[in-house]
Image (cartoon, rainbow, N blue to C red):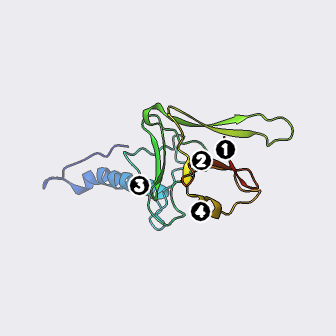
Amino acid sequence: MAITITTLQGTNSLSADRITLNDNFKINTDAINNILSIVDTTTGLIDNTGVSTNNVIKTEGLTTSGSANNGIEVQTGNINITAGSFKATTNGSFLELGADNSKIIDTVLPVGTGGPSPSHIIGATGFIGIQISEMTTTERTAVTLTSTSPKIITFDTTDSKFYGWNGTAWTELG
């Protein structure tokens, strides 16, 4: 709905322009109520579900802040990046996908009887290698691992060898 603007002159009759003015107030009131049905000014929640068939919010950027449990949660659907990269950083750690056509891939493989099904393989393309963690012998042997711990590989900087946790002990690798 468009708002009709009428400039009131000193010679205008308010009773003649009343319909236009009242229509403008009604349009503004309806628009504000529509916005308030999406934005809860008490909680700060923005919820445009059910407003139309296109529930898309477009913006040039999005920043969230709050407690450690707040952030962006995708309850259903995907996060689609059509251009650019996905970057997640925290406390000096990071995960970056999409830079220089590099990819980290989770591949699902069918497994016969006896193994977990389905099984996943994490693969990478566009990289020249995978960096392995490094620990001294003292650090490596101080790590508390059990038979149910993840199987891991590390490079022992004390004796310059690779070791893997096989579920019961650290074993020198090849």
Which of the numbered marks, if any, corresponds to residue 63? 3
Is the Cβ of the residue at disc 3 closer than 8 Å to that at disc 4?
A: no
Q: Name the residue under label 1.
A: 173
Q: Please state, as top left, top right, bottom left or bottom right, where the N terminus lies in the image.
A: top left
Name which of mark 1 and mark 4 comes first in the sequence.
Answer: 4
Q: Distance between the residues labelled 4 and 2?
A: 14 Å
| Location of residue 122 by image quarter | top right
The residue lying toward the viewer, choosing from 139 and 120, is 139
| Residue 144, placed above or below residue 7 | below
Q: Distance between the residues labelled 2 and 3?
A: 44 Å
Name which of mark 4 and mark 2 comes first in the sequence.
Answer: 4
Asked if residue 141 lies left or right of residue 111, the reply is left
On the image, the x and y values in percent for residue 80 come to 52, 38
Name which of mark 1 and mark 3 comes first in the sequence.
Answer: 3
Which of the numbered marks, if any, corresponds to residue 138? 4
Asked if residue 99 lies left or right of residue 3, the reply is right
Is the Cβ of the residue at disc 2 closer than 8 Å to that at disc 1?
A: yes
| Residue 131, placed above or below residue 47 | above
Q: Mark 2 points at which residue?
A: 161
On the image, the x and y values in percent for residue 12 come to 17, 52
Is the Cβ of the residue at disc 2 closer than 8 Å to that at disc 3?
A: no
Q: Distance between the residues labelled 1 and 3?
A: 45 Å
- Element type at mark 1: loop
Q: Which amino acid does label 2 sit on?
A: Lys
Is the Cβ of the residue at disc 1 closer than 8 Å to that at disc 3?
A: no
Q: What residue type is labelled 1?
A: Leu
- Element type at mark 4: helix
Is the Cβ of the residue at disc 4 closer than 8 Å to that at disc 2?
A: no
